[in-house]
Image (cartoon, grey):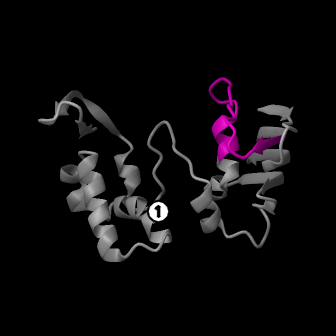
């Protein structure tokens, strides 16, 4: 992904200047510079593999978790350099979240993947336990996972929705049945 896009109509909320990223020797992002204003809609459009998700992962430093990933350039969010030495990455990720099109669990347990967000927001262990169970039940995954909550969430990467969809008595709400490969 290569380009420059400037929005000068209002004060930028996010400023990206000369962003470059490499995975080892392969450069995935080249000289990205743009500004994003608060409460605006910004679309990243391009073919598969062009760097859209890589760019978005830069905004909350998810690329820090990838071995041999090197980032250069500046990203300022609310005028704070998110790659600065004083940036608290946990606080950054509280403010800048990501929702992936496909499941993308952290390399930790099933339990810890669900508990991560509430835990960093100060939710008590008792409430987290209840939240983990209710979240997995809502996703129709409790029966498949309750006995292996300490297992790696990466072991769930082969899940896919089953062909059938279960309907509750209330026809406006749906629950999905999931199967594992």
Quadrant (top left/top right/bottom left/bottom right) for the N terminus: top right
Left or right: where 77 falls relative to 172: right
- Can see residue 25? no
**Residue 181: percent from left, percent from top:** 28, 38
39 is within the stretch colored magenta: yes
Which quadrant of the figure has residue 177? top left
Name the quadrant containing residue 86: bottom right
Seen in the image, is 97 located left or right of residue 77?
left
Q: Report the magenta residues as a range.
A: 33-56
Q: Residue at x 15, y 36 (%)?
A: 168
| Residue occupying image coordinates x 79% and y 62% | 80
Residue 43 spot, x, y in % from top left: 67, 31
Secondary structure beneath dot 1 equals: helix
Please say if 46 is above or below 156: above
> Which is nearer the eye, 42 or 147?
42
The answer to whether residue 75 is visible is: yes
Q: Please provide percent x and percent y for residue 105.
A: 45, 51
Task: List the residue tagged with mark 1.
Answer: 117
**Residue drawn where x is 46% and y is 74% of the image:** 122
Q: How many marks?
A: 1
* Relative vertical location of residue 92 with respect to residue 63 in this rendering, above or below: below
**Residue 67 place in picture, x, y as percent:** 65, 55
């Amino acid at each position: 992904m290569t380009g420059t896009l400037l929005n000068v109509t209002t004060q930028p909320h996010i400023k990206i200047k000369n962003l470059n990223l490499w995975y080892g020797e392969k450069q995935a992002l080249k000289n990205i510079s743009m500004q994003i204003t608060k409460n605006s809609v910004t679309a990243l459009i391009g073919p598969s593999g062009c760097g859209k998700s890589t760019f978005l992962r830069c905004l909350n430093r998810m690329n820090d978790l990838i071995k041999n990933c090197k980032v250069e350039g500046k990203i300022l969010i609310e005028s704070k350099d998110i790659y600065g030495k004083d940036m608290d990455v946990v606080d950054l990720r509280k403010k800048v979240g990501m929702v992936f099109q496909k499941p993308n669990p952290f390399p930790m347990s099933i339990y810890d993947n669900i508990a991560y967000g509430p835990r960093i927001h100060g939710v008590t262990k008792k409430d987290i336990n209840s939240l983990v169970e209710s979240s997995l039940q809502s996703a129709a995954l409790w029966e498949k996972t309750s006995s292996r909550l300490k297992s790696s969430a990466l072991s769930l990467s082969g899940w896919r929705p089953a062909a059938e969809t279960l309907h509750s008595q209330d026809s406006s709400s749906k629950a999905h049945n999931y199967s594992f490969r």
